Amino acid sequence: MKKYWIKKGLMFFVFFTAMLLLVAFIVMGLWNALLPAVLGVNTITFIQALGILLLSKILFGGFRRGSSERGRQWKMKFQEKMASMTLEEKEKFQSEWKNRFGGRWNMQRPEPLI
């Protein structure tokens, strides 16, 4: 099981690095193809393209994982749906969830200590 997570982490790192390099090359290519002719600015290097990409992410995108409001709406909708289910429907949903995702998550809540 530990090998699975190491392999998954390594694949994520490789994919993230490859996407970062690809986007940086796209920024550099677009900058060098368009801006010197349009605005008369100098061409940039790959490292400068990475810097511009990081700066634009900080200024315009931030580092959030997504809209927290959207996540809250989804969570509330899911809780309402679960509250309206009968016991049999909940058990069917839980068993289907375990079958679909390999049973890695235990859907039962732990018993309270008190």
Image: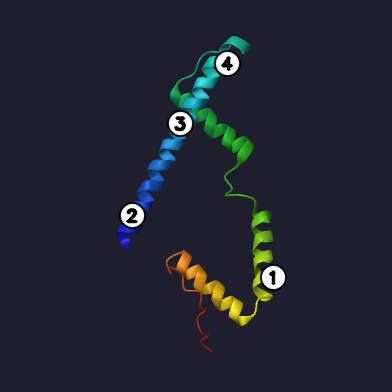
Q: Earlier in the sequence, mark 1 or mark 4?
A: 4
User: Which quarter of the image is occupied by the N terminus?
Assistant: bottom left
Q: Earlier in the sequence, mark 4 or mark 2?
A: 2
Residues under labels 1 and 3: Cα distance?
Answer: 42 Å
Residue in the image at 50% along x and 26% along y: 26
Q: Which residue is mark 1?
A: 80
Under circle 4, the secondary element is helix
The spot of residue 53 in percent (x, y) is 53, 31
The spot of residue 13 in percent (x, y) is 39, 45
Q: Which residue is mark 3?
A: 22
Residues under labels 2 and 1: Cα distance?
Answer: 37 Å
User: Which quarter of the image is occupied by the C terminus?
Assistant: bottom right
Q: Earlier in the sequence, mark 2 or mark 1?
A: 2
Q: Earlier in the sequence, mark 3 or mark 4?
A: 3
Q: Nearer the viewer, mark 1 or mark 4?
A: 1
Residues under labels 4 and 2: Cα distance?
Answer: 42 Å
Residue at the extreme left of the image, as rendered: 3
Residue in the image at 61% along x and 49% along y: 66
Q: Residues within 10 Å of mark 4 (few under 14, many from 20)?
A: few
Residue in the image at 55% along x and 78% along y: 91
Q: Which residue is mark 4?
A: 34
Q: Which residue is mark 2?
A: 6
- Between 111 and 114, the residue placed more toward the observer is 111
Residues under labels 2 and 3: Cα distance?
Answer: 24 Å
Under circle 1, the secondary element is helix
Query: Marks 4 and 2: CB-CB under 8 Å?
Result: no
- Between 88 and 36, the residue placed more toward the observer is 88
